[in-house]
Amino acid sequence: MRIELTKRPQQSVLFSALSPFIALFLTMIAGGLLFATLGKNPFDALYFYFIDPLRETWSLHELAIKAAPLILIAIGLSVCFTSNNWNIGAEGQFVAGAIAGSLIPVLFPNFQMFLVLPMMLILGMAGGAAYAAIPAYLKVRFNTNEILTSLMLVYVAQLFNDWLVRGPWRNPEGFSFPGTVRFHEYAILPQIWPEAGRAHWGFIFALVAAVVVWFVMSRTLKGFEVRVLGQSPRAGRFAGFSSARMVFFAFLLSGAMAGLAGICEVAGPVEHLNEKISIGYGFTAIIVAFLGRLNPLGIVAAGLVLALTYLGGEAAQISLGLSDKAARVFQGMLLFFVLATDTLIHYRIRLAMNIRASAEGA
Amino acid sequence: MGVLEAILLTIATAATPLLIAAVGELVVERSGDLNLGVEGMMVMGAVTGFGMAYVSGSPWVGIICAIIAGALFSLLFAFLVLTLVTNQVATGLALTLLGLGASGMIGEAFIGLPGLKLGTIYIPVLSELPLVGKLIFSQDPIFYISIALTIAVMWFLFKTRAGLTLRAVGDSHGSAHSLGISVLMVRYLAVMFGGACAGLAGAFLSLVYTPQWVENMTAGRGWIALALVVFASWRPLRVLAGAYLFGTITIAQLHIQAISLADLAFLPGPLFWIAQLVKSIPSQFLSSLPYLATVLVLVLISRNRRLTMMNTPASLGKPFVPSR
Amino acid sequence: MKKTLLTLAASAAFAAMASTAASAATKACFIYVGPVGDFGWSYQHDQGRLDVIEALGDQVETAYLESVPEGADSERALERFARSGCNIIFTTSFGYMDATNKVAGKFPDVKFEHATGYKRDHPNVSTYNSKFHEGRYVQGQIAAKLSSAGVAGYIASFPIPEVVMGINAFILGAQSVNPDFKLKVVWANTWFDPGREADAAKALIDQGADIITQHTDSTAPMQVAAERGIKAFGQASDMIQFGPETQLTAIVDDWGPYYIERVKAVIDGTWEQVDVWGGMAEGHVVMAPYTNMPDDVKALAEETQAKITSGEFNPFTGPIKKQDGSDWLAEGEVADDGTLLGMNFYVMGVDDKLPQ
């Protein structure tokens, strides 16, 4: 017996709508089994995962904080991936953006006025974009594989940041602990609604970015260019598009978004630059980009769902003593099911009884 | 044992797990798949190897089980990517996430237990040779396996028909399919081989390198293995060279810190000055050297388009659906 | 499907009720930076939590969160703890300092205990740490007695004051026995990576060290020392199983007594803000049994330990010179806590340049 796929002539509308729910349903069953094996009531566990974090306002704010960097980065990556450029070094660009944006409050702490924050945000985007330009340049100029160069540069950025906050940028009053000075009030990203919770403007930026990028990708010539070059560089060239320029466009855009996420994280909830800011948002965002099917609006939903599993994992850990490891396994399962059910959108699946298949081995 | 001998031995130990995992991934990528789940498969191998060795009392049982566990775990990736044509990058990342979580759960019972260490093989007489004696003829068995594996993969890929088939699948799955080759079958086997190697590399960590189990003990080595494959432009011997180069930089960095300038006072002026300079470089910069070196090598090899075309599996990362 | 959803909803309602109808027990909550399975820092804190359960039984209920990153996530985790009815929250890593103080301001009725930090912005925040360097001094004496090369190797994590303090205490202890004793330091730049720690241990041994001590968390260096047939000191927990013929002693992070004391204070209503820096005297720094050494060395170690415990002796007592030869403490002068807690220089005899 084997599974055969037949390409659908066009995407299935039915399964486009249905597949996330099928995936969620399958995850709940598999997750329930997992929790039951661990001796926990599966219904309680699922409740804490998916419902408990949504019950209170403060928790919704926390959801927005956790989702903001994921969404910001994933939106940039969606353009990159759609154009067939594989930037998997967003984590490095996140760090580069955080460093560049911190230049002003760290080096010029006495320069305090309302202009500081906008300048930091711009510098953050510039830093992320500049760092992303390296793999882009290497790809265009030397045909170097961008997956690997962008990945390698992640480690370099992290180590450089580590050196900065332990060495030249270390807070002189911080008892020799790593980390820069605390940012002054003009360098802090304000909270949207401080009375209700601590969600900051990063989340608004993410939503705006999602709408803008969605519009550009689906309604403008640029979006068409991105898709054509992504699907067939040859066809793109015939249409007069330059794939070299596209490489830069995609990398600079995704780098700038990752850089913005970085500076928002530092100027937002963390309030200073330290060596612990890089906790894998850039990698998780790759998953978010695919969960959202590379569609900016889908990515907003995907980012929120993934953030929910982090919050839910904590709730289950506190209330049921379900370990952090179980939370990660559960996340992994969710991703697998989403990826697997997305196949239904593009393909018809049928089981074929076929003996020849096994005899055909390599 | 002289200092230099000891250093060489340490380098070999640091390089072996990278080499094994990278050689496995090389075969996977040569068949046209990019599996970013090496870290996840490796850590599953580490926990299985430790656990089964502990339960059975035999490190060899642990190693065999780790190999099987790595292969089975990679099947998950293979099923999604090959049968269900999911995105390879996302699936590989998900595999790593799952592996790190699952290994932590499985391993909870093994925390704080001293592990069993795989014995060393001494080859009489030869192991007494100066300098290389200890390095080549007095090692743990997996060291020999890693070298044999590299040579075997080289022979398989470039000297056998099956190897030719595998490369054909990686270069152009369309043509391979029209020649009647079962592309999916070849790729399934390649992915499982990669998983088995990652499992073995993990078992090396938990049974030889540091005989114990702790969560996340692979500490990013799976990612380095991935880099090595490209660093080596998909050539087994260059993977070997790359793994040892990486091991050398890692170990040298620690030695540079440990050595005292007073011990180097015998050096002639300029050399002493260089030593002083090297010692004053912040460790973060030394740590980033291997990554920068990989980028540099990538640039150097890819500048030569003909060379790249010859070695890069052209179908790498592209989905394949057999048409009937 | 429909039935499942109904059951789910019913069970959800039940769970919600169960969580509001909290029992009368005092709830103690712990937040860890690493996995409880690291067999090092976080593991020892979790052992402390288990001690609390054992000592106080039904009076207490506990919860923990592991592997919580020290950025934006820690504040959320703490707020969740505070809202879920925790009466006292132990935040067990330096990086939680700001989050602890912020959340403490919002929840004045919840007690917060922050390990290794120095900020106490609100009356409901205490800080606590242990004088592990007292144990390091004893280790230094043992090392100098037993080393035939006169060189020990020190695997360090990151150049923060606590680690620097430990290195200085070790060399001072060693010099009290052998003034020419040398100490080699390797910065592994990790708290926890068994492979890298093992490599660092090998490098130190290859460079001539014949005693290994570490300020990183894994048992790998102990195993390397055992393999090479030299002696070593354990860190964080008693690592004797990993080197039955290797471990001389270990500095055990025993948080249990402090945790029990503080949780009990909450139960009794006597909790007050404190800044505790407990050492051997308070029972916070515990030495694993002195093993694998001759009786006279053991006697010396026990004597020093007794002197430190009784307060008769402080490891940082002058005359002490800094690494560059300048004077730090005059004869009989004792270092003040402030200098120690921000320590960023070596004393004489350390063969390393402190990364700055």
Image (cartoon, coloured by chain):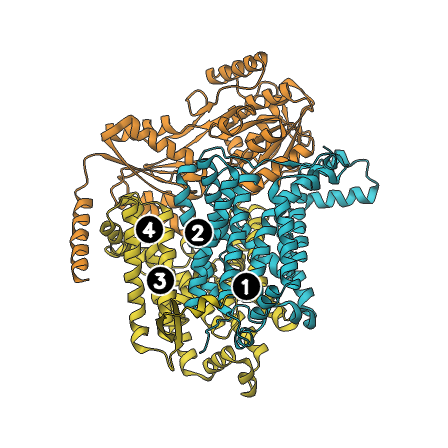
Chain colours: A yellow, B cyan, C orange
Q: Which kind of residue does numbered mark 2 sit on?
A: Gly
The answer as to whether the residues below labels 2 and 1 share one chain is no
Number of the front mark, 2 or 1: 2
Tell me how far mark 3 sits from mark 4, CA to CA: 18 Å
Whether residue B24 is visible here, answered yes or no, is yes
Q: Within 10 angstroms of label 3, few (less than 14), some, or many (20 or more) residues? A: many
Whether residue C118 is visible here, answered yes or no, is no
Q: State the residue lying farthest toward the bottom.
A: A239
Q: Nearer the viewer, residue A93 or C66?
A: C66
Q: Residue shown at 42%/33% (left/top)? A: C44
Number of the front mark, 4 or 2: 2
Q: Residue shown at 55%/30% (left/top)? A: C166
Tell me how far mark 1 sits from mark 4, CA to CA: 33 Å
Q: Within 10 angstroms of label 2, few (less than 14), some, or many (20 or more) residues? A: many
In the image, taking residue B58 as reference, residue B265 lies left or right, namely right
Tell me how far mark 3 sits from mark 2, CA to CA: 16 Å
Give the label on residue A127, or none: 1
* Disc 2: host chain: B
* Disc 3: host chain: A
Q: Can you identify the residue that label 4 sits on?
A: A313
Q: Can you identify the residue that label 3 sits on?
A: A337
Q: Can you identify the residue that label 2 sits on?
A: B99
In what element is the residue under mark 2? helix
